[in-house]
Image (cartoon, rainbow, N blue to C red):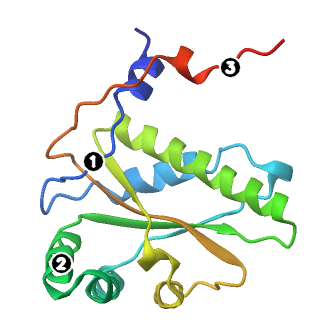
Amino acid sequence: MNHLHKLISSRRTIHEFEPDRLPPADLILKGLELACWAPNHHHVEPWQFYLPGPLTQAAICQLNADCVASAKGELAAEKKLARWQCMPGWLVVTSARAVDPVREQENYAACCCAVQNLALYLWEHGVGLKWSTGDVTRSEKFMQLLGADAESERVVGLFWYGYPQVVPKMSRRPVTESIKELP
């Protein structure tokens, strides 16, 4: 099996990270540089990367806990808050909005490709990633915490990264089940 095949087929979403062990900042920066080589229509590079520091992380954790409390109650919010506070590295990726809905979809797709580039680079260096979305990332307050302009950007995802504590086993259905041959 060649290196790229193994890298792609072994990459997993990581849910449990080693506590208090952050990957080096230069590794993350190099991954973000490579993310920017993703294909993008008209070379617009529609992505923006935010690296929340401890204060912003704490505010996002509390905002999420507030969202969970209103939907599922205080106990669920406390559990979610404790979990989120343990996440090692934080990244938010946004995509440029566009008046043309086709262009906006192309921008979002390019950002997803950028995230895949990042995920594969980090995985190659033993660092896992978890892509998260949800009510908190669609909140106006979330964008305010980032200092982002909700009129010109939309959230692609909130990403946690770090060294995996557990690497889940995974399988995929045969590709033939996803292919429709046409005349």
- Kind of residue at disc 3: Lys
**What distance separates the C-alpha of mark 2 from that of mark 1?**
21 Å
Which residue is tagged 3?
180
Give the number of the disc on residue 131. Answer: none
- Kind of residue at disc 2: Ala
Which residue is tagged 1?
14
Indicate the quadrant containing the C terminus: top left, top right, bottom left or bottom right.
Answer: top right
- Residue 42, x across and y down, in percent: 86, 51
Q: Are marks 3 and 2 in contact (CB under 8 Å)?
A: no
Residue at (47, 75) in percent of width and height = 137
Mark found first going from the N terminus, 3 or 2 = 2
- Kind of residue at disc 1: Ile
Residue at (13, 63) in percent of width and height = 20
Answer left or right for 117 relative to 72: right
Answer left or right for 117 relative to 164: right
Provide the secondary structure element on which disc 1 rests: loop
- Residue 122, x across and y down, in percent: 38, 43
Mark found first going from the N terminus, 2 or 1 = 1
- 21, above or below 35, in the image: below
- 123, above or below 101, in the image: above
Answer left or right for 63 relative to 162: right
Answer yes or no: is residue 45 visible.
Answer: no
Q: Residues within 10 Å of mark 3 (few under 14, many from 20)?
A: few
Rendered image quadrant of residue 105 = bottom right
2 or 1: mark nearer the eye? 2
Rendered image quadrant of residue 44 = bottom right
Give the number of the disc on residue 76. Answer: 2
Q: Are marks 3 and 1 in contact (CB under 8 Å)?
A: no
